[in-house]
Amino acid sequence: MTLYFKYLLLQFKAQMQYRTSFWLLSIGQFFVPFSVFAGLYFLFERFGQLQDWSFHEVALCFAVIHMAFAISECFARGFDAFSSLVAGGDFDRLLVRPRSTALQVLGSKFEFTRFGRLIQGVVVLAWALSGLSVEWTALKVITLILMVISGIFIFTGIFILAATLCFWTIQGLEVVNIFTDGGRELAQYPLNIYHKWATRFFTYVIPFGCVNYLPLMYILDKTEAHNETLYMLTPLAGVAFIVPCLLVWQFGVKHYRSTGS
C-alpha cells in the first residue's frame, strides 16, 4: 500500500502543475451530470412516479451510482486506459518489476478531476435524503455506505475485465462501454423497472442490483421483516465481484504476448 500511495501522490502533484486546467475540468465534471439529473427531474415532473418509486427514492439511487462511478473512474483509471500500455509495449516493463501488475496498472493513472462529479453526487444524495421520511438507524447508515463501496468495486471490476480483453485485442473495445457508461445509466434507476432478464443479469452476473435495488429496499422499509438482514448484506456481493475479475486478469497476464512495439 505504501507504493500505491506514492503513485497517488506523484500523480496528484503532476496534475496540480496545471491548476487552472485542473479546476476547470473539475467544475465541468460537477455540472455535466446535472443534465442527466435534470432529465430525471422532468421525467417525474411529467409522470409523477416510476412504478412504485418516488422521485426522491430514485434520486437516492442516482446519487449512489454516480458517486461510486466517480470514485472508480478516479482511482481505477489505469485499467480504463490500459490499451495504451499494451499497444505501446509499455506493459512489458511492468512484468519485470517485482510488484503486482494489477497494483502497477492501478497506480499508473488517476483522474482527480472526477471529484467534481463526486461532489455533485454528494449534493444530490443530501437533497434526496432530505426529502425522504426514513427512520435512520446505524445499520441503515452502514448499508448506505456499503452501497457506495459495492458500486466502486463493481465498476472497478468491469474496468479490469475490459483491460484484460486488451491482451488479445490490443486496442480497447468500445462495446465494453455498454457495461461501464451503460451500466451507470442503467443502474441509476431501481432494477425492477426493467424486464426480468435484464434484472436477473444485472443482479446475478454483474451485481448492480446489490447496489441500487436490494439494499435500497431495506433502507426504504420495503422488505419483509424476516428478509431484512439478507437485503442489508447484499452489497457484500458487489464487493466480492472484484475477486473473479482479478482472477480473469491473472489469466490474461499469463497469456500475454508482447506487441513488439
Image (cartoon, rainbow, N blue to C red):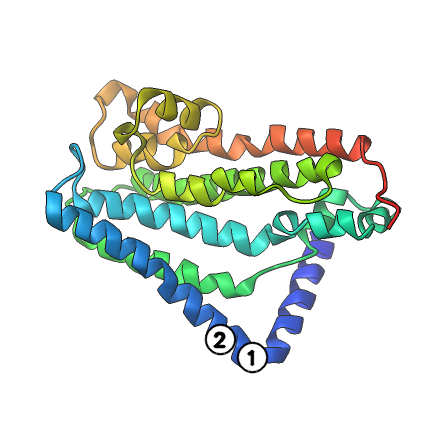
Name the residue beneath numbered marker 2.
23
SS state under label 1: helix
Where, by quadrant of the figure, is residue 248 drawn? Answer: top right
- In the shown orientation, is residue 108 left or right of residue 213? right
Q: Are marks 2 and 1 in contact (CB under 8 Å)?
A: yes
**Horizontal side of residue 21 vs 126, given as left or right:** right
| Dot 2 amino acid type | Trp
Residue at left offset 75%, top offset 51%: 85
Give residue 151's mark.
none
Q: Badge 2: few (under 14), some or many (20 or more) residues near its Cα, within 10 Å?
A: some
Point out residue 133 in the picture as x, y percentages from the top left corner: 14, 45
Relative to the observer, which residue lies in front, 253 or 9?
253
Residue nearest the observer in this picture, 189 or 226? 189
Give the x, y percent position of residue 95: 84, 44
Q: What residue do we see at 20% from left, 53% from top?
A: 41
Q: Is residue 195 left or right of residue 49?
A: right
Q: Residue 213's image quarter?
A: top left
- On screen, residue 140 above or below 77: above
On screen, residue 176 above or below 93: above
Is any part of residue 142 visible from this angle?
A: no
Residue under label 1: 19
Above or below 232: residue 57: below
Circle 1 Cα neighbour tier, 10 Å, few/some/many (<14 / 14–19 / ≥20): few
Quarter of the figure with residue 197: top left
In this orientation, does residue 159 appear? Answer: yes
- In x, y percent, where is residue 52? 15, 33
Element under label 2? helix
In this view, the residue in front, 158 or 46, is 46
- Residue at the spot 18% in from the left edge and 52% down from the top edge: 42
Cα distance in 3D space between marks 2 and 1: 6 Å
Residue drawn at x 39%, y 50% as measured from the top left? 66
Q: Amino acid at mark 1?
A: Arg
